């Protein structure tokens, strides 16, 4: 199945080579894969996966290893951001 992986700011460097727009890539995902599986597969530091959304809906940290991705989902991950 296919999922769009969107990684923002400093996380964009973890995208596979087929990235488009510099922040996203369409990836093939094994059925039954979770958000946690994708974070591990792409070596995204778990502390940097601050804001995680699927199809624009926030997924809490304690739900990421149980949330099973579906075909055509859009998984977006943002690092912590500081401002002033």
Image: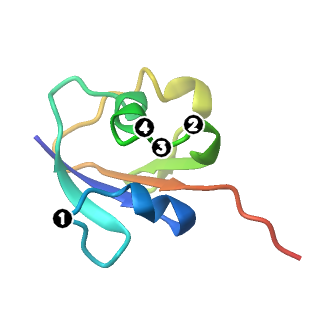
Residue bearing mark 4: 39
Q: Residue at horizontal 25%, vertical 61%?
A: 25
Secondary structure at badge 2 equals: helix
Residue bearing mark 2: 46
Q: Residue at horizontal 30%, vertical 79%?
A: 21
Residue 15 picture location, percent across and down = 33, 58
**49 sits to left or right of 74:** right
Q: Mark 2 and 4 residues: CB-CB less than 8 Å, in contact?
A: yes
The total of numbered circles placed on residues is: 4
Q: Mark 4 and 3 residues: CB-CB less than 8 Å, in contact?
A: yes
Q: CA distance from mark 4 to mark 3?
A: 5 Å
Density class for disc 1 (Cα within 10 Å; few <14, some 14-19, many ≥20) is few
68, 13: nearer the viewer: 13
Quadrant position of the N terminus in the picture: top left
**24 sits to left or right of 70:** right
Residue bearing mark 3: 44
Is residue 7 visible from the viewing direction of this image?
Answer: no
Residue 20 picture location, percent across and down = 25, 74
Residue bearing mark 1: 18
44, 31: nearer the viewer: 44
Q: Residue at horizontal 69%, vertical 56%?
A: 80
Secondary structure at badge 4 equals: helix
Secondary structure at badge 1 equals: loop
Residue furthest left as drawn:
1
Q: Mark 2 and 3 residues: CB-CB less than 8 Å, in contact?
A: yes
- Compare marks 2 and 4 and give the one earlier in the sequence: 4
């Amino acid at each position: 199945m296919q999922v769009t992986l969107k990684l923002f700011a400093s996380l964009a460097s973890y995208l596979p080579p087929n990235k488009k727009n510099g922040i996203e890539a369409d990836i093939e995902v094994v059925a039954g894969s979770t958000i946690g599986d994708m974070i591990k597969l792409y070596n995204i530091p778990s502390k940097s996966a601050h804001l995680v959304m699927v199809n624009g809906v926030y997924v809490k940290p304690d739900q990421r290893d149980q949330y099973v991705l579906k075909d055509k989902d859009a998984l977006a991950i943002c690092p912590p951001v500081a401002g002033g």
